[in-house]
Image (cartoon, rainbow, N blue to C red):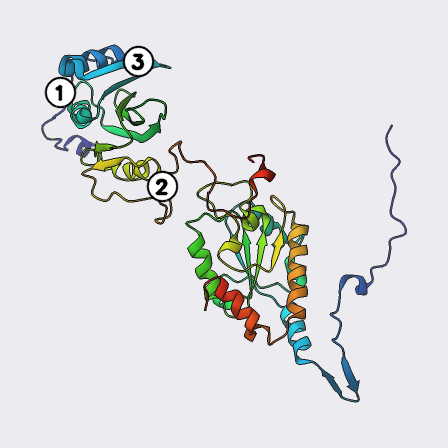
Amino acid sequence: MDRFFTLDHGPCTLDKEVIMVLTNETIQQRLTEKFGELVFHFEESYGMLSFEASKENNLKIIQFLHDDAQLGFRFLTDLCAVNFPDQPGRELAVVYHLHNLTENVRIRFKVFTNITGPDIFTASKLFASANWMERETYDFYGVNFVGHPNLKRILNVDEMDYFPMRKEYPLEDQTRVDKDDEMFGRG
Amino acid sequence: MSRPVRFNIHPIEAKIGDAVSVAEAPQGYSGDGFFTSRLSDVVGLARKNSLWPLPFATSCCGIEFMASMAPHYDIARFGAERVGFSPRQCDLLMVMGTIAKKMGPVLRQVYLQMAEPRWVLAVGACASSGGIFDTYSVLQGIDQIIPVDVYVPGCPPRPEAILDGFMKIQDLVGQESIRRRNSEQYKALMNGYGIE
């Protein structure tokens, strides 16, 4: 049995910090301390904090959420877009779902952009998983992720010439000729 | 009240003729030790009773096809004993399930890899017309990219319907002239799909 106690573990690098629960209030407080007016529209739905920032600051904020020792949002659960056609100038929202795996806390972070120039800085340098998710978001909503290494369609056919999840486009395939709209109650 | 127990004390004798069907000989002249007929009929008879299906199953219709292949329905009774998984060996492409637009070129390539003569059976609403998936990502019927011989309706069709479609294919195969694939109409049909 002795040999189990002769292993050299080396110097321990983990400092035991004071145990502190990461609540939505602390996250909001920490972000407002750091960014002030640059983060806004804090809201809590079903216990999950979500907030907004202007699209120029998205990377700064995600980087801070990732690097800050107290926040530690090191996992990008999801990245997607939402189309709001009735909000002029804010038609497209890009939503980042971030997860603190040690505290098991999730937040949502949104940036809005207009639909005529949907340029958003890519998060693929911070999270490798953002690469494909940004390609998907581009594929369906046409969000142009500036600095993305390989921004091309990922799920739809390459020949597709529009962004099908934008609400200006109908769900049905417009090139079909054999389905009579009147027969389907859409006449 | 419980039902009285009945025993089958008068079982019907099994007749081998009820279980085995023998293909009818084609029309022709026979005499002592010879039989003459049209080559097309003989070839058609041979082809229709030994079709090699290639299942291209992408969704629930494929599950029904599995039932059709299994002992209860048993597509092998119709001569399709040998389900092949190489397009180069098969005569009958059975497309079962939703074909997304991204799958379209794959299906087309599988069809092109099959040697002539080849037949196509579109099983189910999706393969025939896109079905309920009237949407931007789904091919609205495989006949937009490859020619189809028989359509089987249903969502999904029962194995009986798949077998019925298979028997319709057998009828087509049995009646097909051996010169059909060289005809101008057939070439025009293929050219209509961009196939040389």
Q: Secondary structure at mark 1?
A: loop
* Mark 2 or 1, nearer chain start: 1
Which residue does the image show at 80% across and 62% down from the upper left? B18
Q: Amino acid at mark 1?
A: Asp
Q: Earlier in the sequence, mark 1 or mark 3?
A: 1
Q: Which residue is mark 3?
A: A43
Counting from the top left corner in percent of width and height, residue A182 is at 59, 38
Q: Residue shown at 67%/51% (left/top)?
A: B161
Indicate the position of residue A98 as horizontal and vertical percent values. Answer: 27, 25
Q: Residues within 10 Å of mark 3 (few under 14, many from 20)?
A: some
Marks 2 and 3, how far apart at CA = 33 Å
Q: Quadrant of the C terminus of chain A?
A: top right
Q: Is residue A162 left or right of residue B67?
A: left
Does residue B56 appear anywhere in the picture? no
Label 2 is found on which chain of the structure?
Answer: A
Q: Is residue B93 left or right of residue B101?
A: right
- Of callouts 2 and 3, the N-terminal one: 3
Q: Amino acid at mark 2?
A: Tyr
Label 3 chain ID: A
